[in-house]
Amino acid sequence: MQLLKELCAISAPSGSEGKLREFIIKNAEGFCDEIKTDSLGNLIARKKGAGKRIMLSAHMDEVGFITIAIDKKDYVAFSEIGDVKLNTLTGNKVLFLNDKTGIVVEKVEKPIKPSDYRIEVLGCKGESLYMVNVGDVATFYPAFDYNNNFISSKALNSRMGCYVLLQLLKEIQTSKNDLYFVFTAQHQIGFRGAKIAAAQIDPHYSITIDSAVYNDFADIDSSVSIDMGPAVKIMDSSTICHPKIRKLLSEAAEEEGMQIQLEVSENFKSAGSAIQTAGAGVISGTVSIPLKYINTPNEVISFNDVKGSIRLLKRMCAKEI
């Protein structure tokens, strides 16, 4: 739990994953045979085995904000990095990478686009605004809460997958397969890291750890529910997961005696599509962790679902595929 809290506390919007990457390296060293960072910023940790190359991936980056101007009233005008939920912004705190804190305020009534908002940087007016410049980036301010196995925090959409990969690295002692644990960069702006990593590794199989977006108030019942176990993805709007991966995951769940869900998501895309179509194509699938309030300051997950994902993937990785 403490590791997940520390992962969520680090600010890492797309293209600025460096601090988080260094934290992950410190926690991964000693549990893998080799570790490297590629030119795009992906972190790849390998646990060698004689069998098939299996790529296990999760993205590091989170949504954020980038400064585009300082207006005449000394407020920061910004644009989005990724799909920020604009209707959740008013009054929320943000944290710049230089540790300056800001508050998002409405410039107009009923704001509907980023230019309708501004950020007031605390204590920075007039000449002191040099502390925030055009191009500086920010994320939602970290606030991690845990109660009765439920967690709320910014960046859970990415960090829960990073947590799963780190725990698998620590728990898998040896492997018959050649395992690549990939912490990808620039997911929020088009799954760039996943595509580049897959091209390098050329895996036989790939499994992405991602979120299954859940909404208590959706007009149509979701295919998944929070706190009911991890989900094996069938399809989303960008990919159809390979039946072989679905079968292997279902068998692993049965062997573990654990409950899994099946996910069909018509309105969301996933990094699995970028991996699936890399090179000559990859047999790909996704394990999804149900999540509420995606890309807001307070995403919500069940820690039971996270632990279930670790059990499921650990069992599958032990198979000789």
Image: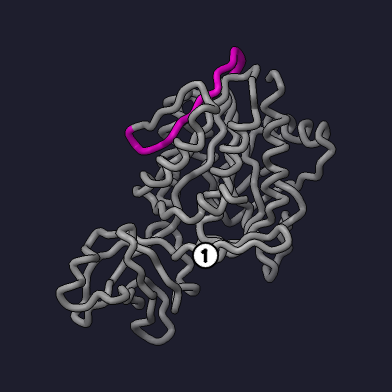
Q: Tell me if residue 246 is in the magenta stretch.
A: no
Residue appearing at x 34%, y 61% in the figure: 99
The location of residue 73, given as percent across then percent down, is 22, 82
The location of residue 116, given as percent across then percent down, is 35, 78
Can residue 41 be spotted in the picture?
Answer: yes
Residue appearing at x 17%, y 78% in the figure: 126
User: Residue 302 falls in which quadrant of the image?
Assistant: bottom right
Q: Is residue 75 left or right of residue 147?
A: left
Which residues fall within the magenta stretch? 39-52
Q: Main secondary structure of the magenta part?
A: loop
Q: Secondary structure at mark 1?
A: loop
The location of residue 233, given as percent across then percent down, is 67, 44
Q: Is residue 165 left or right of residue 248?
A: left
The location of residue 122, given as percent across then percent down, is 32, 75
Relative height, residue 294 to residue 312 (above, below): below
| Quadrant, the C terminus | top right
Relative height, residue 281 to residue 50 (above, below): below
Is 115 in front, or is 9?
9
Relative height, residue 146 to residue 275 (above, below): below
Q: Is residue 249 left or right of residue 29?
A: right
Residue appearing at x 55%, y 29% in the figure: 55
Q: Residue furthest bottom?
A: 109
> Residue beneath label 1, please?
143
Which residue type carries mark 1? Answer: Ala
Number of numbered discs present? 1
Specify how the rendered protein is coloured: one colour
Q: Is residue 131 left or right of residue 29?
A: left
Relative height, residue 307 to residue 127 (above, below): above
Q: Residue furthest top?
A: 50
Residue appearing at x 43%, y 35% in the figure: 43
